Amino acid sequence: MVESADTRDAPRVKMRTRRLKLWYGDKQALAGIDLDVPEHRVTALIGPSGCGKTTFLKCLNRMTDTIDGVTTEGSVTLDDVDVRDRSVDVVQLRARVGMVFQKPNPFPKTVYDNIAYGPRIHGLAANRRELDDIVESSLRRAGLWEEVSGRLGDLATGMSGGQQQRLCIARSIAVAPEVILMDEPCSALDPISTARIEELIDDLRTKYTIVIVTHNLQQAARVSQMTAFFHLGRLIEVNSTAELFQSPAESMTEDYITGRFG
Amino acid sequence: MTDMTQPATSVHQSDTSRERLRRRYGRERSFKIISVSALGLTALFLVILLGSIVLNGWSGFLTTKLRLEVTYSTKHLDVEDPANGNFRMIILDALRERFPDVTERRELRALLGIVSNRGTWDVRDALLDDPSLAGGSLELWLPAATEVDMLNKGYVDRSAPEELRLIDDRTIAWVDAIDEADDLATVFNWTFLLSGDSREPELAGVGGAVLGSFWILLVTFVVSFPTGVGAAIFLEEFAPKRRWVDVIEVNINNLAAVPSIVFGLLGLAVFLNVMHMPRSAPVVGGLTLALMTLPTIIIATRAALKGIPPSIKDAALAIGASPVQVVSHHLLPLAMPRILTGAIIGMARALGESAPLLMVGMVAFVVDLPSGPTDAATALPVQVFLWADSPERGFVEKTSAAIMVLLVFLVAMNGLAVYLRQRFEIRW
């Protein structure tokens, strides 16, 4: 592993993993990952299929808990508190560390109810007006307000794929998270919707810390400031995105980004 | 291929290829013929079944009534208590007036026999409604005895020798005379729908059995639905995927296939012999059928929960919903149409079940309408069984008519299940 050369204004570390190991039953999927996720930056996780990127992402908000037969080892910290500590409530952790999935998965409810669901269960709004405000500001931040302000009562499942994915981003923003995890958020979208989401990610960085898994190297280069390359459950290299794409330190990284394998 | 210069498409235009194609079409055609004829055979059986039931049963919804001019002669009445008169004599007087040439005692008794026993009650009720009738007279439509009813509906073969008929020549003559005077009518049989069982076919009704079935199903639903849905949610969403969960799953699937009579024996042993609950009561029948319906509901609920895309669950978990919130806010509402469909189909099966009810004493002759789940009652399919077992000709049509009532309820329940599925199910 190679340290970042650019340390001039090194940001605070928001999430940190140390010797993170994970097994699906007997099969080891992560073999000791040490990664620092800088605050207010976009960190991209790249690597060939099955390298453990998504598994790693799911460790950050303990979505791995919902999978049967998973055992983990090592530490994952959020603001220097281990997320697996007994004092950490998993429900609250997931409100602080939101997640956007590969396939848009809006609830089969109205646009309004999709956004309002999170604030409702976490008691973020004292009354209907505050809830309306949260819904509006979340949709605005996700760049969706102009398109859906007139049809908040429509079923979210009737929107286009790109709109659905931005709705899912708005839904995770609505619970005021600190970190947003994105698992290949554009893989099911057309190029125009993808461009909109990429712009959105860049905007969101000022307020949130973002970790994004992507198969698209150009996308990683466009949206992220940090890039981590995974291979077969190991973190091969992590560096500033510019550094990693221009002069990778590991030959394996170079092979991957130049398209020689993967 | 021998000639490599031929275009590549030739493989699919050769004679063997054409032959293969022809055979494939042949196989598809014969498969279609087999499918359609299987469907046709099923439809034929259904038509035969329903046709024979309707043909036998439609007349059960009708009954025969006689018009008589009854005179409330004060010599048959108790002036102090009008309810206490000799109403048989009043009817007999009315008949005697009509057929003055009948004088012999035995003949008079036979003449009185053309009016149903229920007639005396109708005559009495008319007087109680209007006590000023005492001494006056009134035209009344009285229910005919079952033999007259059968004759009127054409179930009596007039050409058969008298001793093989259930009604003799003399009575036929009386009935014909009444009919000629336009005093014989075939009307809708409200008694059949509203009253309980009776020894007299013309007075027997499915009302008691319908109410009994209602109380049984109410108990069954109240017990099995929450238990079954709760068990299914636990098994599907909360129970760790361990060996004992598999064992439970196998057992539930087996329970769904256990013959219903076994549940009846279990109900008899546990609810009656150990817990000493009342015999013939819908509460016991309902609990027994709940045991039988439980596996069906558990299986339907688990299938409904499995049918919800896991992405919905992920979405809810990822914005910080607790497992219980995931179930109550998302999974259960989304699965509900299919759960209800499964539950209704389970209930419809319970409605048509008779064997377990026989074991808990619901195969009883119950005249009164049950007013609650602890009153003695019988159920629709058991009523069918009881009537099918009765020797009187009048019960033949009642049996088929009761089956029609049962089928109407079954079709209505299954229709509701289909409607719920079509109307509320969300598709992905």
Image (cartoon, rainbow, N blue to C red):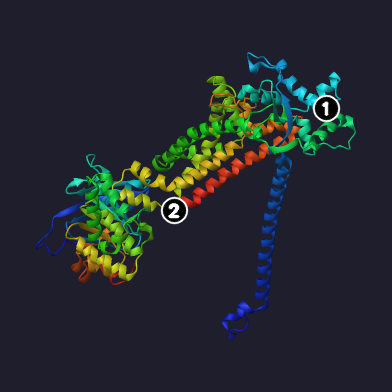
Left-right relation of B412 to A37: right
| Dot 1 amino acid type | Phe
- In the image, residue A134 lies at what x, y percent? 23, 53
Residue at mark 1 to residue at mark 2: CA–CA distance:
72 Å
Badge 2 sits on which subunit?
A: B
Tag in front: 1 or 2: 1
Quick one: label 1, few (<14), some, or many (20+) residues within 10 Å? some
> From what the image shows, is residue A154 above or below residue B2?
above
Where the N terminus of chain B falls, by quadrant? bottom right
Badge 1 sits on which subunit?
A: B
Quick one: label 2, few (<14), some, or many (20+) residues within 10 Å? few
Q: Earlier in the sequence, mark 1 or mark 2?
A: 1
Q: Nearer the viewer, residue A177 or A260?
A: A177
> From what the image shows, is residue B204 above or below residue A136?
above
Residue B204: quadrant of the picture: top right
Q: Which numbered circle lies on residue B426?
A: 2
| Dot 2 amino acid type | Ile
> From what the image shows, is residue B366 above or below residue B410?
above
Q: Tell me if I can see residue A255 in this picture.
A: yes
**Residue at far bottom of view:** B5
Q: Tell me if I can see residue B356 in this picture.
A: no
Q: Which numbered circle lies on residue B99?
A: 1
| Label 1: element kind | loop
Residue B322: quadrant of the picture: top left
- In the image, residue A78 lies at what x, y percent? 20, 49
Q: Which numbered circle lies on residue B136?
A: none
Which residue corresponds to the image point at 34% horizontal and 43% vertical from the top-left? B325
Q: Nearer the viewer, residue B261 or A115?
A: A115
- In the image, residue B159 lies at what x, y percent? 89, 38
- In the image, residue A244 lies at what x, y percent? 21, 67
Left-right relation of A172 to B151: left
**Residue at far right of view:** B161
